[in-house]
Amino acid sequence: MWIVLVIVLFMVFVVLGFVPVVGGLATALLLPVFAGSLMLAARKAAGGATLEVGDLLAAFRDHLNPLLVLGALNLVATLVLGGLATMMGLGAVIGVIAGAAGSSPGAVLTALGAGMAALIILLVLGLVLAMALWFAPSLVVFRGTPPVEAVGISLRASLKNIAPFTLYGLAYILAAIVATIPLGLGWVVLVPVLILTVYTSYRDIFGGQ
């Protein structure tokens, strides 16, 4: 059933992806809402209940507004990261490297160095964003934590547990490589596992609900 939920959610995002501009904005806004629904579904399954497709909409009923605020924060942060990527000239860097045949070796090396530095900065900022949102939907749906406060709590909890999260990240990278090998079909299993690790990590750190 977890696989079914993931496939349905994937189809929703694919449909949204066909809508120019608005689809991307809607995806960023709705991602925390669906994440909240999946956390509620995980708690339901942990209690021994049977999951249903309708569980994907669980958070829409009682937690829509605060989760949409999280979505707005996610959208703004994503736009900021995109703007930073543009300001750092990643597009130009890629262009120089792609046209390396007509560029001097020095220009290519300079562009490559600048690109690596920009990429590292963006990866660090992206990691901070991921940590800020990792527990935020769970805190909203389980504890009624205000969205901005939930982001701060999630970030502090992630930083406090940076060592296990680093090990988790390495394990995830290996699992992602394995999942990608069979034509990407392994992701059908890996994504539900990822969702459940979000829930179990929340339970481990915050306990109770």
Image (spheres, rainbow, N blue to C red):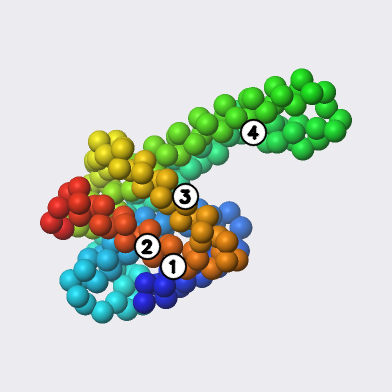
Residue at 37% x, 72% y is 2
Disc 4 designates what residue? 90
| Residue type at numbered disc 1 | Val
Disc 3 designates what residue? 173
Quick check: 196 above or below 97?
below
Residue at 25% x, 57% y is 200
| Residue type at numbered disc 3 | Ile
Secondary structure of the residue carrying tag 4 is: helix
Distance of mark 1 from mark 3, alpha carbons? 15 Å
Disc 1 designates what residue? 189
Measured as percent of width and height from the top left, residue 6 is found at 43, 69
Quick check: 90 above or below 45?
above
Residue at 51% x, 41% y is 79
Quick check: 98 above or below 110?
below
Disc 2 designates what residue? 193
Q: Residues within 10 Å of mark 1 (few under 14, many from 20)?
A: few
Mark 1 in CB contact with mark 3 (< 8 angstroms): no
